[in-house]
Image: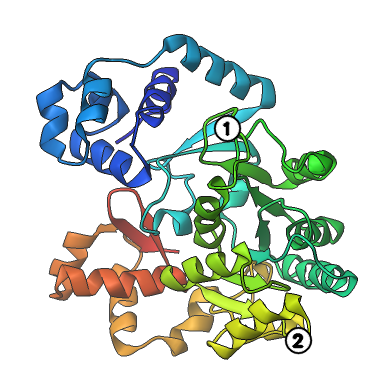
């Protein structure tokens, strides 16, 4: 699947407007039919053969019921805000995000697209933090950014905003994942912060332009925050905080979860203390995070002394070492690599995922793999 033309954008926008077609169904359609143009042009029976659409969606797509004036408005809003489409089949699509169960087939990006493929680390928490929580967040974020990680948050009030501020104040990079259209800054008082984020990092959204910041958007948004990241840190959160949902996504996505312990007598400590009780890594300083993260921070990897591959090879299991060395300097399809090593494809994919998580192997579109 290739292409990055104006027609691709128009077709993707049409598909994203189809009733009842979320990221999983859209991915299935694109993979089955070959691309957005093929889906848009498919007739009722061809769409029905894919087996993911209900009758309403089938009639809507086969009947070409989209409004091209709405498509024009979407593109105009993107142009007005400097928003760029990023498709799942492009090499620039964030590698970590592509590995989750339901990655968006298209992201709306404002700012530096390159920042999405740097080592990312998420810092999140309550919208109503204590002063100590804000200061702790800024300090930890500055330390994480100083180690070479891009700090990911949700641009929400409170801990999320403090995380972005700490990263930027230290000269680092921040990415904010929005629960609304990329043309809407929410909360509005973060307009200046959003501009600063775009200067070094980016704002991203999976929602159509103009989508309001409705409550049901944010839980879905949270899976992208963890999906982009190597690990997730929660600073302050109550038992009903959305940050705990993000931590749950992180566990499902095989990301490390960290939490700053708090006073057990305070509501804002209940969520983080529960996470630690359930196995989250306790954080007292930024070193507690950096020492736990598998692999080298980005800046350490560029010192020129030892490559990250050489540093990490002793930590590999026997089967990981076999796959790592089997790839060598080639770019191989998973089937080729399985045949070369005499391994079952399903077993090999599990090992490759671990190597990707360790930043030793990079996954490319089409199940191609090379050393990272």
For the C terminus, the quadrant is bottom left
Query: Which residue does the numbered mark 1 point to in the structure image?
Result: 211
- Using the rendered view, name the quadrant where residue 271 is placed: bottom right
Pointers 1 and 2 in contact (C-beta within 8 Å): no
- Using the rendered view, name the quadrant where residue 135 is placed: bottom right
Q: CA distance from mark 1 to mark 2?
A: 39 Å
Foreground disc of the pair 1, 2? 1
Q: Decide if residue 326 is in sight here.
A: no
Residue, x 58% and y 70% (percent of image)?
A: 244
Give percent across and percent down for residue 70. Answer: 49, 15
Residue, x 49% and y 44% (percent of image)?
A: 92
Residue, x 29% and y 73% (percent of image)?
A: 350
Q: Decide if residue 133 is in sight here.
A: yes
Could you say which is closer to the camera, residue 305 or residue 97? 97
Apparent side of residue 180 relative to residue 207 in the rendered image (left or right): right
Could you say which is closer to the camera, residue 267 or residue 233? 267
Look at the numbered disc 2 and give the secondary structure of its residue: loop
Query: Which residue does the numbered mark 2 point to in the structure image?
Result: 284
Look at the numbered disc 1 and give the secondary structure of its residue: loop
Residue, far top: 69
């Amino acid at each position: 699947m290739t292409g990055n033309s104006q027609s691709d954008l128009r077709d993707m926008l049409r598909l994203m407007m189809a009733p009842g077609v979320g990221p999983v169904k859209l991915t299935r359609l694109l993979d089955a039919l070959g691309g957005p143009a093929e889906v848009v042009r498919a007739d009722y029976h061809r769409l029905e053969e894919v087996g993911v659409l209900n009758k309403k969606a089938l009639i809507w797509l086969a009947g070409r019921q989209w409004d091209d004036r709405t498509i024009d408005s979407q593109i105009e809003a993107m142009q007005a805000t400097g928003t760029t489409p990023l498709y799942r089949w492009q090499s620039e699509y964030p590698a970590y995000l592509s590995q989750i169960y339901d990655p968006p087939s298209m992201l709306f990006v404002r700012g530096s697209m390159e920042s999405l493929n740097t080592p990312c680390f998420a810092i999140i928490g309550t919208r109503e933090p204590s002063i100590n929580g804000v200061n702790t967040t800024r300090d930890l974020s500055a330390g994480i950014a100083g180690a070479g990680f891009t700090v990911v948050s949700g641009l929400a009030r409170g801990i999320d905003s403090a995380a972005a501020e700490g990263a930027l104040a230290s000269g680092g990079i921040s990415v904010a994942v929005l629960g609304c259209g990329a043309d809407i800054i929410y909360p509005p008082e973060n307009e200046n912060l959003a501009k600063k984020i775009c200067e070094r990092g980016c704002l991203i959204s999976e929602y159509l332009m103009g989508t309001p910041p409705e409550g049901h958007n944010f839980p879905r948004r949270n899976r992208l925050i963890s999906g982009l990241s190597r690990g997730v840190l929660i600073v302050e959160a109550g038992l009903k905080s959305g940050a705990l949902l993000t931590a749950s996504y992180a566990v499902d996505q095989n990301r490390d979860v960290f939490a700053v312990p708090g006073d057990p007598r305070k509501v804002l400590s209940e969520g983080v203390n529960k996470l630690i009780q359930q196995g989250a890594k306790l954080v007292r300083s930024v070193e507690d995070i950096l020492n736990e993260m598998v692999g080298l921070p980005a800046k350490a990897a560029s010192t020129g002394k030892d490559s990250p591959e050489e540093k990490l090879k002793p930590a590999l299991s026997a089967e990981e070492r076999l796959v790592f060395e089997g790839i060598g300097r080639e770019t191989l399809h998973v089937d080729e690599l399985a045949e070369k090593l005499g391994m079952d494809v399903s077993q090999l994919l599990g090992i490759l995922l671990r190597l990707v998580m360790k930043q030793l192997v990079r996954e490319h579109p089409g199940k191609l793999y090379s050393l990272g």
